[in-house]
Image (spheres, rainbow, N blue to C red):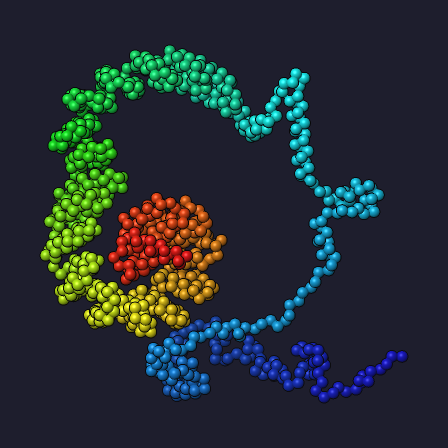
Amino acid sequence: MTKRLDFVGKPAPPNYVAGLGRGATGFTTRSDIGPARETGDIGSDVKHAPGKEGEDEDDERFQDPDNEIGLFSKAPYEEDDEEADRVWGMIDEKMDERRRVRREAREREELARYRLERPKISQQFADLKRQLTTINEAEWAAIPEVGDLVGKNRRRNKMPERFTPLPDTILAAARDRTQYETTLDEAEQKLGGIASSTLDNEMMTNFKEIGQARDKVLGLKLDQVSDSVSGQTTIDPKGYLTDLNSVVVKSTTEIGDIKKARLLLNSVITTNPMHAPGWIAAARVEEVAGRAVQARSVIARGCEQCPKNEDVWLEAARLNTTENAKIILANAVRHLPQSVKIWLKAVDLETDQKAQKRVLRRALEFIPNSVKLWRAAVNMEENPDDAKVLLSRAVELVPMSVDLWLALARLESYANAKKVLNVARTTIPTSHEIWIAAARLEEERGNPEIIDRIITRAVYTLSQTGSVLDRDQWLKEAETCEKNGSVATCQSIVRATVALGIEDEDRKSTWMEDAESCMAHGSIETARAIYAYALKVFPGKKSIWRQAAFLEKSHGTPESLEELLQRAVRYCPQAEVLWLMGAKEKWLAGDIQGARNILEEAFRANPNSEQIWLAAVKVESESQEYKNARKLLEMARSQSGTERVWMKSAMLERQMKNFDECLALIDEGLKKYPTFDKFWMIKGQVEDTALGQPAKARETYNKAVKSCPKSITLWILLAQLEEKMGMVTKARATLEKARYINPKTSELWVQAIRIETRANNTVAAKAMAAKALQECPSSGALWTEVIFLEARPQRKARSVDGLKKCEHDPIIVTTVARLFWTERKIEKARNWFQKAVQIDPDQGDSFAWWYNFELQHGTEEHREIVVKRCVAAEPHHGEHWQAVAKDVANIGKKVDELLKLCAARLDQLK
């Protein structure tokens, strides 16, 4: 008997839906359309009921009868139809025009009603924006910073972390796997412990015991070999193993190659026994294989087959001993008495000088016209008289050899040398070397007035004989004479040939290129001669005088530079640069009065010249004659009155710590030149650092960026001041506004990245660096920041990317040198620092980093090299270099002092 449920056969409760409690809803069947859905869900039935709004729109019964696509799609479209369509279109446009006014008015009312219900965010804060016009700078600065509230709203996973512990059996198995068994189980005890290594197929190999056994076996073998009945050993036990290192063990591949080569070459010498290179190659194969006896045998047969080939005899001499080689060469001379190589090889085999001379004289009997043999014979003579006799005979037998004639002239006296050169010139009329030797002879004799005549006549005579040298070849001969010490001959060649074959309009540019090329080769006297000739032709060209002055400054004496500048200002009195160079040289030499005299003459030649005014002020201020400097500046402001004059006036007052007068001059200068950004910089720096008024300085910078929005330095100074005052967000906003006004400016991106770095916001700094590289991919300073944002292992890869984008940027090259420095690769770092200063000598930061590197890893000589190169370059650019050089406390200091100060600054920043 089964128990009957009490609800079976009874009616369902009100509003009961079967399966609603377990989620069985949302589907219907034909049998239960009504009860199988939730109460009140009738929208879907109404929507899908037949004959209602949900009817199928594709049904042909409900198509628009006005739509003729389906009705008359195949009927012809005639002119009447077109006319009817045009008439109905005009009616529609007329009706639409009548309703337009009411429709637009209704749309405006609906939009106004919508804006009242849902206003824009800008409209909601319109009244607050209007109130911002009454806020001053102090109230604006007092607005608190916005905190980072993003992390507080993040949803956290409230589900606890689940950990499933490992079974103890797994842990025990892992522990026992790495340990040695010290006990035997029952099965192993029955087998006597032998099966312990084979039951589990786990054999433990003890390599130490194998090595000890091998050494023991080898020692036994050595003992057996060393011991004998007679007590004498047949092998050295101590040197046995070391001798094995000298044995060259050839691989199977090498042996196979040797066999193939031997087979091929054997075929060559068999089929063509008169082919000398085949015999030489066959002998060398045997030599490589280590079979010296077979090699000598092969080459001996080659000498028999090819007795008229000198290479075979020379190869045979090389493969044999010295004594045998002498015999072989003696036999070779019988077959080839005219071979110079064989005779010279025979001379080399002789160790006694007398024997060598005997062989050479015997060779000259067979080959009297060989220049090599005569030269070798002359070089062996220690007595000049004997060499002179040989050369006299040599020029008779070989009259067309210029070298022999010149050698004989060098050994003769002055009078005989002139005769020798005259005979040589008659014998060889196409040789320019003889003419140059004659000029050098006169220079050595001390007759400089004859040199020009000789060179001029040489150029004319050679042109008549058809042996014409072009201008480049003559200049090379001039450089050769300079290297040999014949400066007058070098200058004479330049004067006679530098204008050959040049058009008049190309002379100046061509000569400047020639002079620069000579300076690059180290031929200073040749370049000086070219400049002298160019100044003779173009005495009024300021650029030539300036290049010549630079040459004298680098490679000449102070007296020669002064003399050149005096001639320069006499021909070019309007050239301010030449006057200033002369004054600077006097001032560097400590002659202050001489510098003043030069500047006074410059004033008379160039009245109201800004550069000369400022140079005079610099001389007086660095001589601590501040009263004279003030008077000069007052006169300059009244007569010249340029921006730089006003700026130097303010800088002088700032240097003397007269800040009120400095600010007064700045304000007066800003009235005249409100867009001169350096006025604003000086004023802001004085208010910030000297007077301690950062708020006032910030107000000044805000006005400055409005007057000079394109000045990058002003934007950076404003952002740095705001960051120093604690307004990091405003500093970010300032730099963003600056980037909007000055797009593609790498300096602004660099400052923005540094702000994020100093705020320990590395993620934001990297994101900003990625944006910056998209806008400025070729900035070395930007790549430097990107490289040092990476971790140490990734910096090398980033530096490679930076070098691909800006290979010739000194900043990125210096950065790579610093990376090598951190990796302790001293020589590589030094080479890259040298490369950086060679790319741009005007970049002072590269010199400072290099000097800092040499302080740590270099010697005193290395540091002196850096200082000398920096002093010669006189750099003016560089972020840290300019900060040190333009500091008021460092005014008047020399380049080497600034280098050391900048290096100390960089040492603190590392």
Spot occupied by residue 118 in the image (x, y as percentages of width and height): 45, 84
In depth, the one of 795 and 806 nearer the eye is 795
849 on left or right of 456:
right
The residue lying furthest to the right in this view is 1
713 on left or right of 42:
left
Q: Quadrant of residue 479?
A: top left
Tell me what residue is drawn at x 78 percent, y 43 percent: 196
Spot occupied by residue 307 in the image (x, y as percentages of width and height): 41, 14
In this orientation, does residue 203 appear?
yes
Tell me what residue is drawn at x 40 percent, y 80 percent: 122
Q: Which corner quadrant holds the C terminus?
A: bottom left
In depth, the one of 859 and 645 nearer the eye is 859
Spot occupied by residue 689 in the image (x, y as percentages of width and height): 31, 68
Vertical order, 413 against 598 (above or below): above
The residue lying furthest to the front in this view is 624
Q: Which corner quadrant holds the N terminus?
A: bottom right
Tell me what residue is drawn at x 62 percent, y 72 percent: 158
Vertical order, 688 against 52 (above or below): above
866 on left or right of 593:
right
Vertical order, 328 against 680 (above or below): above
In depth, the one of 655 and 194 nearer the eye is 655
In depth, the one of 253 and 363 nearer the eye is 363
Tell me what residue is drawn at x 30 percent, y 12 percent: 365
* Count of residue discs: 0
Spot occupied by residue 457 in the image (x, y as percentages of width and height): 13, 30
In this orientation, does residue 577 appear?
no
